[in-house]
């Protein structure tokens, strides 16, 4: 905003360059942040409509019912659309862009003492490709065919024949391209632009997590991009990559070339989508690590084993994908391999989580809002991880596969897990980004109801799953006898979901209010040790820091014995 | 633990191999419970004991023991037990011990949007020829059976109605005409994707008849509702009610049922075939 305003046109251009088509990593990070938060809210609203349908099937949806036709009742194909789009939006337009695009972009250069990302223009290209992908995805709601309705997993042959899938695939190609651009940039930035003295083992957990995450994105997404193009060709160009011969639909022989394999898609899809799970988790673990160290006022316990575990997780995550496919007719060798790798990958996860729990011991624990979210992350993510065990073991998966147990499992990982960590991160770094502190009172008003209602939604899913209720049923299981004993939970879960929506109001109010009238934040309001706190709040436009940064210590030198202060910043000798 | 899972909603198991699957689930849930209680107790104690208002100065070193490695080792051991003791053998039985069609009641199940076609080979024990070119839904020929084939004459084909005898090996050869479905019998712990272009065998042995099952669920929300075939893979618009009915009979009941279905066959398709033969 520092323009000499005697030339009005020049000023306008400046604004666009500075806040719209900026190449500054901080602006791009905030652009990513705002866009993805809006998508998260949108994805949540889709789920709220679905949850109304599940609790009160066949009744008119309040407030927004008119969108779904005259009766105001959700038709089953609309339910399928909302389901597919909820998953897609939450993962590809909400959490990944928030965790990697927003947090990664904003914080990685700051944490390594760099003035910007290695490729600022590539960075802007990444955001705008994401933005276009998002617009295309949302536009599919207004297309004659409607939005995609074959699940976020888009299994052919269904996806090749169902409405709305073409737009979904085109959008995915944009989103994947965006992720590839962004993640390559992060890798190069971390390798090349670290401040003098910032050796690998001095790198904070958050940056390590972004580093591993970016490798996952770079290596896992290309197969899905290829697969998306192939499925698009199956739909529009008459190819049959994923279509076998001899399909009969509605009594008519389907006129396709045939000889393709529906399972090929599943392999390509899960080759991305399993590492993608770690793309969702690792940045969250990184954020939580930072906040735990800061608010226990002591070093993270087992720092090195956490880093090694993260790298190991990254590698192993590439060879577990087919545990999503145990029931596709898999033989003994394949199933043995993939369930063994799945059990192996649980070990580093246990190591990381246990180290975080142990980090609390001996601390001087401050219960501020970021810490509350970070602390709640631990048991919630624990439930999510543990309930993955019976799903990863092929034998117990036979029964639990594709039931609500799975839905409960991965929502615990991603919702009260990752999303809580992202909330924690927002509260923690908001002072750095804006120069203002967020309200603690509103923060707690956001935290406690969110924690309670998250559990209200997801805990009963395990009960429904144990009863054998399948996911993706437009009537929530009303048609099936085996669901009859657990259907009464649907209303409870739906009411929890609506309340969870209300619980986000303090958060939104808090962001807006703090921006205008929040308490001014100093450079290092949390008495933290990592390099981003050396910069002014907010960091200066070009260059981030007032001067060159040197790094002298490991990342979490809190409460060093015989030190006057209880923290020893990395950037101070 | 099994009682606990039942109390949460796990239906009673009605098949021979279901017991092993339930055992695997019980083991995993014990592991989960121990870990969660362990973490949880440590978590709560730490938060209370080391709150800033009480513990002003943090300890730079924190936990000094390496007991956590023991925990991690224990998890690894339980997982090895789960793999070698439970999961590998269960899976090997599932995919390597598929009974020969002569040693089991062999049934073909062909899934389609949104119904289950159940194909019995009839008295000769041989499935008749099918051809997709013969599929004609208006004539109720959903799977394209060729009634002129000698093995097809006694084949019984039904939609959404499956009967099986109790305590006999059942082998279902599963396929799909259109998209991917999943053939799920929750109470029998059976679940298998039906994938177009593939035929996948799945085998099981029911241990309780439908009649006994219905008796046992009296007084629960399940009362009066029999066993069902569920579709457990999103397959399109009315996936949510792609439901078939499963009846587990005693052997005598099953044979009577087969005979009654076969009788029906003689009147209907027998005439058709005669007419066809004369004409050509």
Image: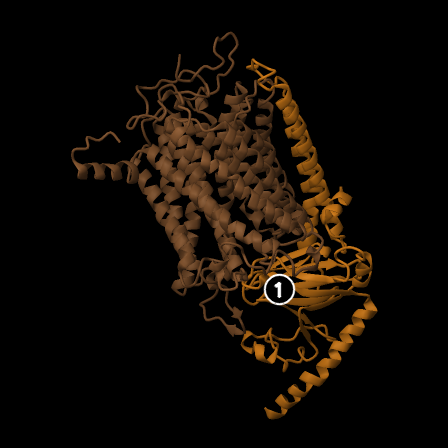
Chain colours: A brown, B orange
Residue A337 makes an appearance in the image: no
Nearer the observer, B61 or A528: A528
Q: Which residue is mark 1?
A: B242
| Residue B149, x across and y down, in percent | 64, 80
* A52 sits left or right of B92 in the view: left
Nearer the observer, A442 or A484: A442
| Residue B37, x across and y down, in percent | 69, 31
Q: Is the residue A21 above or below the residue B195 in the image?
A: above
Quarter that holds the N terminus of chain A: top left
Residue A177 makes an appearance in the image: yes
Residue at image location 41% in from the left, 53% down from the top: A138
Nearer the observer, B229 or A192: B229
In this rendering, the count of numbered labels is 1
Q: Given the current orientation, which residue lies at the most extreme left position?
A: A7
Image quadrant in which you'd find residue B137: bottom right
| Residue B155, x across and y down, in percent | 69, 76
Quarter that holds the C terminus of chain A: top left
Residue at image location 40% in from the left, 36% down from the top: A102
* A449 sits left or right of A430 in the view: right
């Amino acid at each position: 905003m520092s323009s000499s305003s005697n030339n009005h046109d020049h000023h306008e251009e400046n604004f666009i360059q500075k806040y719209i088509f900026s190449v500054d990593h901080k602006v791009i990070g905030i652009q990513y942040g705002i866009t993805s938060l809006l998508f998260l809210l949108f994805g949540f609203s889709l789920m709220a409509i679905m949850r109304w349908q599940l609790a009160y099937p066949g009744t008119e949806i309040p407030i927004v019912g008119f969108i779904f036709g005259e009766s105001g009742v959700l038709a089953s194909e609309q339910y399928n659309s909302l389901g597919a789009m909820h998953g897609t939006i939450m993962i590809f337009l909400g959490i990944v862009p928030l965790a990697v695009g927003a947090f990664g972009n904003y914080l990685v250069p700051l944490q390594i003492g760099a003035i910007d990302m290695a490729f600022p223009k590539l960075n802007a290209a990444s955001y705008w490709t994401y933005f276009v992908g998002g617009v295309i995805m949302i536009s599919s709601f207004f297309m004659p065919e409607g939005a995609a309705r074959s699940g976020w997993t888009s299994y052919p042959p269904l996806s090749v024949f169902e409405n709305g899938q073409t737009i979904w695939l085109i959008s995915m190609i944009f989103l994947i391209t965006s992720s590839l651009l962004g993640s390559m940039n992060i890798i190069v930035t971390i390798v090349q632009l670290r401040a003098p003295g910032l050796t690998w083992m001095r790198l904070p957990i958050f940056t390590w997590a972004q580093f591993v995450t970016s490798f996952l994105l770079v290596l896992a997404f290309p197969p899905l991009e290829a697969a998306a193009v192939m499925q698009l060709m199956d739909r529009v160009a008459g190819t049959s990559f994923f279509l076998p011969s001899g399909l009969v639909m509605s009594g008519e022989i389907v006129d396709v070339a045939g000889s393709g394999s529906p399972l090929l898609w599943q392999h390509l899809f899960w080759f991305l989508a399993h590492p993608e799970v770690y793309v969702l988790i690792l940045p969250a673990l990184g954020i939580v690590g930072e906040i735990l160290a800061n608010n226990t006022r002591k070093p993270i316990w087992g720092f090195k084993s956490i880093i090694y575990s993260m790298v190991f997780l990254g590698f192993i995550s590439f060879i577990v994908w087919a545990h999503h496919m145990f029931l596709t007719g898999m033989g003994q060798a394949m199933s043995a391999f993939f369930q063994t790798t799945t059990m192996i990958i649980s070990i580093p996860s246990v190591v990381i989580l246990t180290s975080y729990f142990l980090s609390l011991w001996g601390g001087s624990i401050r219960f501020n809002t970021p810490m509350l979210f970070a602390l709640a992350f631990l048991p919630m993510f624990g439930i999510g991880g543990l309930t993955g065990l019976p799903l990863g073991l092929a034998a117990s998966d036979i029964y639990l596969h594709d039931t609500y147990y799975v839905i409960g499992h991965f929502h615990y990982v991603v919702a009260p897990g990752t999303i809580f960590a992202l909330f924690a991160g927002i509260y923690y770094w908001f002072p750095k980004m804006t120069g203002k502190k967020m309200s603690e009172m509103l923060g707690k008003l956001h935290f406690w109801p969110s924690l309670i209602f998250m559990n209200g939604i997801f805990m009963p899913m395990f009960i429904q799953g144990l009863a054998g209720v399948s996911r993706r049923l437009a009537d929530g299981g009303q048609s099936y006898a085996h669901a009859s004993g657990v259907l009464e939970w649907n209303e409870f879960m739906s009411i929890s979901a609506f309340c969870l929506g209300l619980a986000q109001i303090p958060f939104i109010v808090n962001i807006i209010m703090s921006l205008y009238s929040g308490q001014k934040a100093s450079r290092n309001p949390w008495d933290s040790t990592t390099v981003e706190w050396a910069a002014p709040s907010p960091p200066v436009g070009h260059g981030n820091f007032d001067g060159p940064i040197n790094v002298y210590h490991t990342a979490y030198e809190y409460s060093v014995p015989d030190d006057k202060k209880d923290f020893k910043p990395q950037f101070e000798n | 633990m099994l009682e606990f899972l039942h109390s949460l909603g796990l239906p009673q198991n009605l098949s021979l191999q279901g017991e092993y699957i339930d055992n695997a689930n019980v083991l995993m849930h014990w592991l989960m419970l121990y870990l969660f209680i362990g973490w949880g107790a440590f978590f709560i104690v730490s938060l209370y004991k080391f709150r800033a208002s009480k513990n002003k100065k943090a300890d730079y070193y924190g936990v000094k023991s390496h007991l956590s490695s023991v925990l991690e080792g224990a998890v690894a051991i339980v997982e090895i037990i789960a793999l070698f003791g439970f999961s590998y053998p269960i899976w090997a039985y599932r995919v390597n011990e598929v009974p020969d069609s002569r040693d089991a009641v062999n049934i073909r199940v062909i899934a389609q949007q949104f119904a289950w076609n159940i194909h019995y080979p009839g008295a000769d024990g041989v499935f008749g020829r099918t051809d997709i070119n013969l599929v004609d839904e208006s004539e109720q020929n959903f799977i394209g059976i060729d009634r002129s084939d000698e093995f097809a004459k006694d084949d019984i084909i039904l939609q959404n109605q499956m009967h099986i005898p109790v305590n006999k090996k059942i082998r279902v050869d599963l396929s799909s005409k259109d998209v991917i479905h999943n053939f799920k019998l929750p109470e029998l712990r059976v679940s298998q994707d039906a994938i177009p272009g593939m035929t996948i065998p799945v085998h099981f042995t029911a241990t309780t008849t439908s009649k006994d099952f219905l008796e046992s669920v009296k007084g629960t929300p399940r009362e009066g509702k029999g066993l069902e075939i569920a579709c457990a893979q999103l397959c399109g618009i009315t996936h949510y009610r792609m439901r078939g009915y499963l009846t587990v009979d005693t052997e005598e009941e099953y044979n009577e049922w087969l005979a009654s279905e076969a009788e029906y066959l003689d009147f209907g398709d027998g005439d058709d075939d005669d007419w066809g033969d004369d004409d050509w």
